[in-house]
Image (cartoon, rainbow, N blue to C red):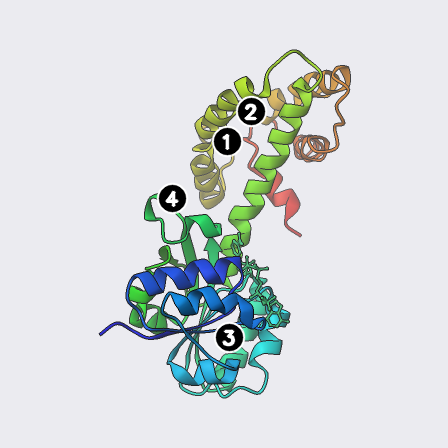
Amino acid sequence: EKTSVTLLGLGAMGTALARTWLAAGHPLTVWNRTPARAAALAAEGARVADSAAEAVASNTLVVVCLLDDTSVDEVLAGIDLSGRDLVNLTTSTPAQARARAEWAHERGARYLDGGIMAVPPMIGVPEAGGYVFYSGSRELFERHREPLAIPAGTTYVGEDAGFAALHDLALLSAMYGMFAGVAHAFALIRKEDIDPVVLAPLLADWLVAMAPTVHQTAEQLRSGDYTKGVVSNLAMQVAGTPTFLSTAEQQGVSPELLGPYFELMRRRLAQGSGEEDLTGVIDLLVH
Ligand code: NDP
């Protein structure tokens, strides 16, 4: 007997999730503010509830995938959640997730928060490597492990309901840093006779080659010794920054993405940390 699932929210992500449960044979009840979005799923076997309240009343496991925390508030306002296993996959801040957990507990529900590390085309495609960070009730996570694992992989990161969001945002923040570096790299060649399509695989391979440095950074943070295993120390790297800034200027490229990072490196060096790795920059960021 497969667990019956209720899903609130049939946007791009909700619809992708829904299809995987239907394909796996889980009875599915769906609700969406704009009913038209449920029509295709109804044809694929989903039961369409007339209201969010009816959808919530239909099953113990209630998955929510709405735009943001405000929409979760609006949709669930006044609905009886007692005895429900609420799994909220709506992107939120850690503080919002913690508050939502409290809110759910006050209403007699168990709560699990999720942060989706995938885009809709990766849902239901195990080889795409997408997964969902979960935090909050471990009991709820264990109980629904099977249905939760159908759309994507699952990674449980702790009882603190805010941790899924925090992990999600940490990874995405690193991604934006990478995008910033890539933007600068492409900008440097923009006016030259260099094919971006030829540069792209070189860039991708370089980023992959550099990615394992995060392990050394983590070891240094754990031990507190930022000089351990240093290959290119901060003094040497700061000495190199004028080369990057001059090159940017010569290529007519703004330093506004790289500049702030270089400034932090200089500030850390000024504290007498020339023999360290770049890890000390992290401490400058934390207030
Ligand atoms: P969409 O914009 O495609 O869908 C938004 C959904 O929220 C729709 O079902 C919409 O209903 C509903 N909604 C918005 N506001 C309200 C409201 N006030 N009351 C009721 N329903 C409301 O977003 P996605 O499906 O892509 O994203 C859903 C969640 O998944 C978001 O939190 C997003 O951050 C997260 N996510 C999305 C990813 C992606 O790549 N798409 C990746 C990782 C996470 P209606 O149809 O009526 O407008």
> Which residue in the protein does label 4 denote?
128
Label 2 vs 1, first from the N-terminus: 1
Q: Amino acid at mark 1?
A: Thr
Question: The disc labelled 4 sits on which kind of residue?
Answer: Ala
Q: Which mark is residue 233?
A: 2
Q: Residues within 10 Å of mark 3 (few under 14, many from 20)?
A: many
| Residue at 36% from the left image edge and 53% from the top image edge | 124
| Location of mark 3 (residue) | 101
Residue found at the very far left of the displayed protein: 1
Q: Which residue is mark 1?
A: 227
Looking at the image, tell me whether mark 4 or mark 3 is earlier in sequence order. Answer: 3
Q: What mark, if any, has residue 164 been given in the picture?
A: none
Instruction: Give the SS element for disc 2.
Output: loop
Q: Nearer the viewer, residue 3 or 155?
A: 3
- Relative to 251, does residue 101 appear above or below in the rendering? below
59 in relation to 18, above or below: below
Residue 141 at what x, y percent from top left?
A: 35, 68
Residue at 53% in and 64% down: 90
Q: List x then y, in percent, for residue 2.
A: 26, 72
Q: Is residue 169 left or right of residue 110?
A: right
